[in-house]
Amino acid sequence: MSRSQPRVRACWLGSVPYREAWDLQAELARELREGQGPDTLLLLEHPHVFTMGKAAAPEHLLWDEAERRRRGVEVVWSDRGGEATYHGPGQLVGYPVMDLARLELTIPRYLELLEHSLIDYLGELGIVSGPGGPGFTGVWRQGEKLAAIGIKLNRSVVSHGFALNLTTNLSYFDGIVPCGHADRRPTSVQVVTGARVDTRTAADGYARNFAATFGVELDWVAPSSLAGAGGAPVRG
């Protein structure tokens, strides 16, 4: 008898402030570490925010407080890996909160699969992309970054994830040193193809690639079911 595929809960959250999504991930990760919850794929977008990972430094912020206030950009110092990045409207954010031990995955293999799930989805949009090579995480096309990746591991439970530029206003990246590389610039699906793909449509398309790449079955749930389990507020 063939082995059944692992099941992962999937949820589209809509637009959610960064700290709110961070709190939700922490609650889901806690439940997983205690053996109480399922693996979950959160798909969403954030309002304008610069997030500073564990390797970020104050000098990676290029806009001063007045300019950030004028542009409506929050700054959050996060517990994910990596340096500075930008999140905002027109960007698909994915946070897999999963127990890698349960899925029999190592961290290198998990990161490889996460990259390839994005590469395969971009391929469906007609974009040839690939990993950035040593020292350059994420997904790239001709030296420009389409998707950033930054994760956190607590015991065997992974959280945080990726941000894929769809119709993102790339001028906001001018306010930081993106991922510590001043000479490497971001791009977007819209810049590369001229097509406008909205985040909800991208979430559905990407989710199919995530399931195929990781060899899992997705069970879609409403945001209210996550709030009921962990008590963290989410906005659908």
Image (cartoon, helix red, strand yellow):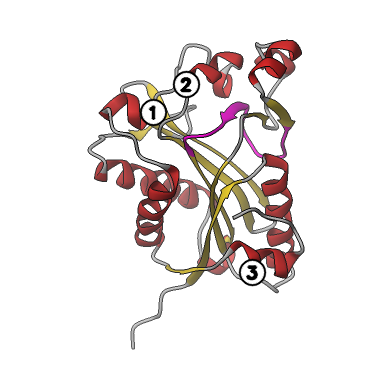
Q: Amino acid at mark 3?
A: Ser
Q: Characterize the magenta stretch by its predominant secondary structure.
A: loop
Q: Which residues are magenta?
A: 77-91
Query: Is 81 one of the magenta-colored residues?
Result: yes
First in sequence: mark 2 vs mark 3: 2
Question: Are the residues at dot 2 and dot 1 in contact (C-beta closer than 8 Å)?
Answer: yes
The residue lying at 72 percent from left, 27 percent from top is 75
Q: Return the residue at label 1.
A: 188
Q: Return the residue at label 3.
A: 225
Q: How many marks?
A: 3
Q: Quadrant of residue 68?
A: top right
Q: Return the residue at label 2.
A: 170
First in sequence: mark 2 vs mark 1: 2
Q: Amino acid at mark 1?
A: Ser
Is 66 situated left or right of 85 in this image?
Answer: right
Query: Quick one: SS at disc 1?
Result: loop
Q: Amino acid at mark 2?
A: Leu
